[in-house]
Image (spheres, helix red, strand yellow):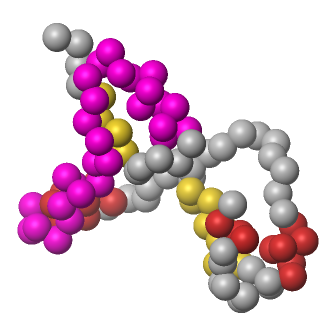
Amino acid sequence: TAVYVARNGGTFTQGGMGKTDIMFPIGIMCGKELHVTGSFRYSAGDYQLALDMVASGRLNVKDLISKTVPFEEAKEAFENVKHGNGIKWLIEGPK
């Protein structure tokens, strides 16, 4: 997890929901004196902020797409994301 590479005194933020029960390296967290926070989703105004960033060119969403694959390769795309290969795989709709 990111806890292992966080700097001493740094912050670890868990974004989104994972499994209800997990194994967590609490010894590493305590030893590094990390600040741990959680973030469930988004807050008020985030959609508008994102739209403004895209419209102004400050955020190029195309850079977020790791790969585009045809619908027939959807299973491969999910497996790659599961194993940390890329950020966002775009699956084309069936033709």
Question: As drawn, is 71 to the left or to the right of 59?
Answer: right
- Residue at figure coordinates x 48%, y 37% from the top left: 80
Q: Is residue 94 above or below residue 41?
A: above
Range of magenta residues: 55-82
- Residue at figure coordinates x 17%, y 71% from the top left: 58
Residue 79 within the segment the image draws in magenta = yes
The residue furthest right is: 27
The residue furthest bottom is: 9
Residue 54 within the segment the image draws in magenta = no
- Residue 36 at least partly seen: no
The residue furthest left is: 56
Q: Main secondary structure of the magenta part?
A: helix
Question: As drawn, is 37 to the left or to the right of 63?
Answer: right
Q: Residue 21 appears at what percent x and percent y? A: 82, 42
- Residue at figure coordinates x 11%, y 67% from the top left: 57
Residue 49 lies in what quarter of the image?
A: bottom left
Which of the two residues, 21 or 86, is positioned nearer the viewer here? 86
